[in-house]
Image (spheres, rainbow, N blue to C red):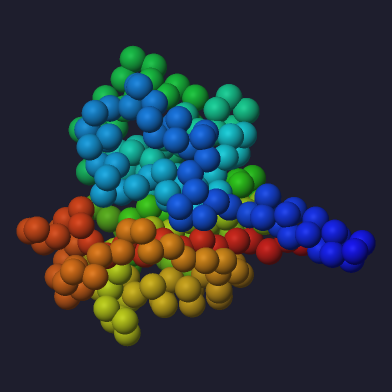
Amino acid sequence: MKKALLTFALIASVLAAAPAGAGDVPDAIAAAVGHADRPDADKTRDAARKPDKVLAFFGIAPGMTVLDLFAGGGFYTEILARLVGPDGKVTAHNNHAYLNYARKDIGPRYADGRLAEVERVTIEANELELEENSYDAVLMILTYHDIYLTSEPEDWPVIDGPRLLGAIVKGLKPGGVLGIVDHRARAGAPATTGDSLHRIDPEIVKAELAAAGLVFEGAADFLANPEDDLDKPMYAEGIRGKTDRFVFRFRKPEG
């Protein structure tokens, strides 16, 4: 009987510490996504992007320190800022190309002191240096494929992928999470589809992050779309916003 009770207690403790599953959305995340001050334009994208499920799957919670890497216009940055609260911290990173691309969204996002608590950093990926063991989580939302971007935009520097991944791993705390959402490429497609189609084969992501020292912890399928034509660029007419997207969670080993 004592052995059974001990086993039950161990299972309960593991479940309590684990990130929420694909169907579970903690109240803090629901409140951040439903915050009255979020722009209407953001809320209209929620049905397709499912930020509540994404953040629940990654285990993001109040009090965390989170890096939104290649944050773009700040769709996720805003939700993260509402979610982590005053005891947490959010860093929104962009390189100069992303900053220019998303300028029309970034301006209103931070106008008149909005999201003043967010630390904004503009630096090229090849120059990114993160303080060791400083982040509970790093998110790359629809941007991992950009590691392979070479042809556009003109001001996009070619990224040293292993260096960038090394910087991320260094910056994560032991046990910290790297959350990836990206447009799926056909299985076996070369990494160059990151440039030509703005898609990436999920197996490439797994292999590269394993080589960087992270442990693949799980995948979610709530952004999957089997009707997506994986041979077309993600911005093709009728596809943009409806791509087949994979959601991966990786963790930095303890110790």
Residue 63 appears in the rendering: yes
In the rendered image, the residue lying farthest to the left is: 237
Tell me where residue 52 sits by quadrant.
top left
The reply, left or right, for residue 101 in relation to residue 214 is left
Residue 67 visible in the displayed image: no
Q: Residue at x 34, y 47 (%)?
A: 50
Q: Quadrant of residue 150?
A: bottom left
Q: Is residue 143 above or below residue 191?
A: above
Task: Decide if residue 188 is on the left or right side of residue 133.
Answer: left
* Image position, residue 168 (x, y; %): 54, 56
Of the 4 image quadrants, the one containing the C terminus is bottom right
Identity of the residue furthest to the top in this view: 112
Residue 114: quarter of image: top left
Left or right placement of residue 45 versus residue 57 in this view: left
Q: How many marks?
A: 0
| Percent x, y of residue 244 | 27, 65
User: As rendered, which of 219 and 127 lies closer to the eye?
Assistant: 219
Instruction: Give 220 or 185, whichever is nearer the viewer.
Output: 220
Q: In this rendering, is residue 53 above or below 225? A: above
Q: Is residue 131 above or below residue 147?
A: above
Instruction: Residue at 58% x, 52% y: name it.
Output: 19
Foreground: 119 or 26? 26
Q: Residue furthest front?
A: 1
Where the N terminus falls, by quadrant?
Answer: bottom right
Residue positioned 22% across, 37% down in the render: 44
Q: Position of residue 183 (x, y in %)?
A: 29, 64
Q: Position of residue 9 (x, y in %)?
A: 80, 56
Q: Residue furthest bottom?
A: 188
